[in-house]
Image: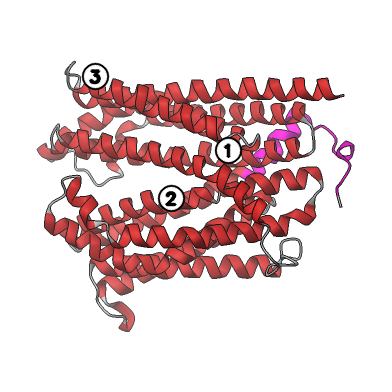
Amino acid sequence: MTQDIHTHSPQTIRQELGATSRLALPLAGAALAQMGMGLTDTIMLGSVGREALAAGGLGGSVFFMFSGMFQNVVASVAILIAHARGSGETDQIDSIFRAGLILSLMGTLPLFFMLWNVEPFLLWVGEPPALASDVTAYMRVIIIGTPAIMVAAAMRFYLSAMNHPRIILIVSIIGLFANGLLDYGLIYGAWGLPELGFLGAAYATAIVMWISAIATSIAIRLTPALKPKRLFAPIDWSIFLELNKLGWPIAVIFSVETMLFMVGALLMGTLGTVSLAAHQVTIMIAATSFMMPMAVGQAANVRVGYHMGAGMPASARRSGFVALGLGFAITTVTAIIIVLFPMELTLLFQLDPDSPDDAVVIALVIRLLAICALFQFVDGAQAVGAGILRGYKDTRVPMILATIGYWGVGFTVAWTLAFPMGFGPEGLWWGLATGLAAAAILLCGRFLYISKRALAQTVASS
């Protein structure tokens, strides 16, 4: 039954800030726990040898790139459920969830095919044949978990839209500890488990994907407010098509941003091993700090979508500004930390300042971190801006705007500064920051435009 939109009372800025924070904090914690799994793999594989670390590290990065694209397609589940909750059309939620699960399972097939046949891609981008072969072997193990990770993605977006992010956090923490134990057991052959070397990390990750998916499913079924009433009813194909329409542009945004940083790493590699090593350390710090504004963007998607579903564009606009303010506050803190503690952050990556080779890398990392501190603001703003626009069901235009910012501006400036103008690694990072700044300006400008248009349409129809 459709709920009357007038039963939704506008919230104050303080109330909206509290609602957004309660949603964003567990999501950020879950994202950090998932990053922790990658860090655990890196630490474990590093003790096996450089070849194992290279194969496992590159394998994990490639898997994240391809799987992340398909997982982001089902981000549209959160958009439609937030609108349905806001409008009071809660009878639609089961249909949206069902269609999202089908969409996630359909994404498994192309993801499986791409990961199974990743070797030609790796050779094309210039990876050594031996490394490409090892990474392919790694991929052909980790794909065991692809159905689980895709279904888990749909469930996570369902939980965030239903305001139950703590389940996501708890399951992610369980996955982090399970991954550490399985890594140790399967890489080194501890506790009677087979000694599989670097492939042990792939088996561990695949098993954890299934553990996480099963645990999330059980949590949903045991929570009365979340348990679907008609999970196996016929699919509403109009909803399925709308999920596709909204979801693929989100996946493209993720892909073009990920590809920009992958190409950035390849370009940095042409400047030498010191530049590449410093870049990898700096990008890990930036990626870790990015988890909070990314979570705020996901929360903004839900909050804005809820208010738009309720027919309250003024509240949706307020939610957007609150999310941007919260994102700015968070990135201010992370920027201050980076400015005040660059050496301490750098030394977390096991670099030895007394080693002449490491000292050169450390010096470059500290210079890049100065740029990274400013990078925080624009990276956070573009992530939150994209999340806000999803709440308006606006994904296609942001896809175009983000591509222009990342590649039309970012790649062009990065390449020009790094090579023709000779600024090297710092020039490349200034270019990446410029691209994110362009995307932030375009996406936030789009929010101002579309929120004003929504207000004007409400006034005109009243």
Task: Point out the tag, 1 or 2, that comes first from the N-terminus.
Answer: 2
Q: Residue at x 63, y 20 (%)?
A: 449
142 versus 269 height, above or below? below
**Identity of the residue furthest to the left in this view:** 356
Q: Residue at x 46, y 25 (%)?
A: 439
Colouring style: secondary structure
Q: Which mark is residue 417?
A: 3
Circle 2 sits in a helix, a strand or a loop, which is it?
Answer: helix
Viewer-proximal residue among 313 and 45: 313
Q: Which mark is residue 296?
A: 1
Asked if the residue under mark 2 is in contact with the one under mark 1, i.e. CB atoms within 8 Å, the reply is no
| Residue 14 covered by magenta stretch | yes
How crowded is the residue under tag 1: few (<14 C-alpha within 10 Å), some, or many (20+)? many
Residue 260 rendering spot, x and y as whole percentages: 33, 35
How crowded is the residue under tag 3: few (<14 C-alpha within 10 Å), some, or many (20+)? many
Circle 3 sits in a helix, a strand or a loop, which is it?
Answer: helix
Which residues fall within the magenta stretch? 2-23
**Image quarter for residue 450?**
top right
Secondary structure mostly seen in the magenta stretch: helix
Task: Point out the tag, 1 or 3, that comes first from the N-terminus.
Answer: 1
